[in-house]
Structures are given as C-alpha cells and as structure tokens.
Image: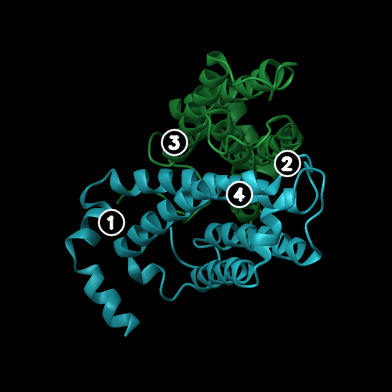
Amino acid sequence: MLQAFSTWLHGTTLSWAVAGGIPWIWPACETLHFMGLALLVGVVGVLDLRMLGMAKGLPLGPLQRLMPWAILGFGINMVTGFLFFAGDPFQYIHNIAFGFKLLFIGLAGVNVILFYVTCLSRTVDGVGAGHDVPPAAKLVAATSLFLWVGVMYWGRMLPFIGNAF
Amino acid sequence: MQFLLWLERSALGSWVRESSSLWAYPTILFAHTVGLGFLVGTNTAVDLRMLGFAERLPLAPMERFFSVMWLGFWVNALSGTLLLIADASTKLTNPVFYVKMAFVTLAVVNMVLIRRRVFRDPALDTAPLAGPAKVLAVTSLFFWMGAITAGRLMAYFGPVSGAPGLQNRIP
C-alpha cells in the first residue's frame, strides 16, 4: 500500500515541482525546515530546561504561553517534511533512518499526550517562580529533550545511514 | 589556495570528509544541527518574549538561557571549523560562506547587546520594554534567519563540497 501510494505521489505535479521541476522549492523548503526546527527546539527546550530546574525564576503558566510558537515550528516542519517526501518518496520509504525519525516524532507526540491526559500539564501550569515541578513532569521534560535531539539525529542520518540526500 | 588544499588534504580534513565512520562527517554535521537548534532556538524564545508574546513571563530569569546560547555557539564554532577544514578549498572560495559568517557575526553581536542593554537594565520587568529593545529582538530574528538561509544555500551555490556521494543539489 505504501508502495502504491508512493508510486501515485511520485507521479503528481507536486512531486515533479518539489524534485527540481521548480528548482528553488527544495532549497527553500530545507531552509524553512531549519527555521521550524529552531522554533520548535528553542521553545520546547526552554520549557523542558525550566521544568528540569534551570531558570527557576520563570513561572510555568506564562512560559507555556510560548507553546503556540513551538506548534508553529512543528507545523512548518510537517508541511516541508511532507514536501520532501512527495518530491522523492522512494528515498524515504526504505530508509531506516526515516523510520526511526518518524518513530521518535511519534514517541514525542505520545509524551505530550501523556503530559495532558494525566493532568500533569495543569499541575505544571500552576508552578510559580522558584518552585519545582513534580518528578513525573521532570521525567516528561527529560524524555522530550532526548526525543527531539533524537529526531534531529535521525533526520541528519537520512543520507548517511539511509539513502536520502 | 595552496594553503586551503593543504588544509583539506591534511589527515584531519581527509578523515572528516572521507572516513566511512559515522563519527566523522555525519556526527559533526549532527552536532552542528543540534547547536543551531539550541543557539537560534533559545535566542528566538527570548526575542518573542521581548516582542510582547507571553507578556506575563518575567524576562530577568531568562538570562540563565544565555549559557545555553553560548554552549550552542561553541558547539557550532567547533563543528563548523571541522567541516570547514574538510572542505577548505570549496567553502572558503564560496561567497555564500562569507555571507553566512557576516550574518552569524551580526547575530552574535546582537545577542551580546541584548544581554547588556536589555537584561542589565535595572528597570527590566518593572516597565514595558522600550522601542530600541524591540528593535534588537527584530534584528536578532532577522540575522539568525539570514544565517540559516545562507548556510543552507552554501550547498547550492558555488563549488560542490561535502561528504563524497552526498549530493545535496538540485539535479
């Protein structure tokens, strides 16, 4: 099914355009992908580091108001990432690094969902300046940092462990 | 040019470029990406706060994150130097590389200015940020975006560089 989807996608005009039919699209998407990365890792990183005890003077409620920017970064990278995939699906579907990248993104998503469904986020929201978050929230923060650095690792390894450029 | 060729053909330059070990080119490039994420990302978070987002968040405690920015900077200065040695004759003759360095220099000077002018201001968090502080936040975002764009375009303009077999170019 993945094979069939990839074959169909590869035949679309979108795929042609991204893969070089319109030459500036690929480099422009790569540039945006790095900007999205910085936005996501920066905002999530600041939040995670605060939960782990750095810059304790920051109250967590107001700090979480920066999260829409991380979501924007994630959105930019979802769109540009999909465009790379559309441009040349076959360099990704059999690419082990791509598989791990998607797995790590998925795990980061599960981590966030757990943070919300366990109501940990609401507890954290009320943690003011100078106070510690519960140990469970520290675990979520450390996991998040590990997973996002992991996503960058697998993304970088696409051409080296896998076969993408 | 002789010197650049000598540099990239040195044992270190050749190893970074041609070793099949994941610890060579791939890991150095990965470090450069993580450094970018933390350096530009933490700067961006501070800039956004300075521009008025999350306005109930006090700025003063965010000064702690300058250590994260500097860590990211040094990781990238080191990994960038290694990548540069490996491709000295191509990268140092690529005008886009100098554009990138100009943007990085401006961005880092901007970052130091934010710390000195905004974070060392005794009135910080007691009064709304003044216009010049907001200008520094905007220029910071602009310089970092410029650095990222130029860095990425180095793979498309000028002489081909990078690990052998790595074709990061439009066909």
Measured Cα–Cα span from mark 2 to mark 3: 32 Å
Q: Amino acid at mark 2?
A: Leu
Q: Which residue is mark 3?
A: B149
Secondary structure at numbered mark 1:
helix
Within 10 Å of disc 2 (Cα), the crowding (few <14, some 14-19, many 20+) is many
The color chain A is rendered in = cyan
Question: Tag 1, which chain?
Answer: A
Q: CA distance from mark 4 to mark 1?
A: 38 Å
Labels 1 and 3 in the same subunit: no
Marks 4/2: CA distance?
A: 10 Å
Q: Residue visible at 26% across and 52% down? A: A20
Labels 4 and 2: the sequence-earlier one: 2
In the image, B115 versus A135, the foreground residue is A135
Q: Residue at x 49, y 34 (%)?
A: B90
| Residue under the point 25% across and 68% down | A10
Left or right of residue A152: residue A33: left
User: Which of the 4 image quarters holds residue A140?
Assistant: bottom right
The CA span between labels 2 and 1 is 45 Å
Mark drawn on residue A58: 2
Disc 4 and disc 1 on one polypeptide chain: yes
Question: What colour has chain B?
Answer: green
> Subunit of mark 2?
A
* Residue at which label 1 appears: A19
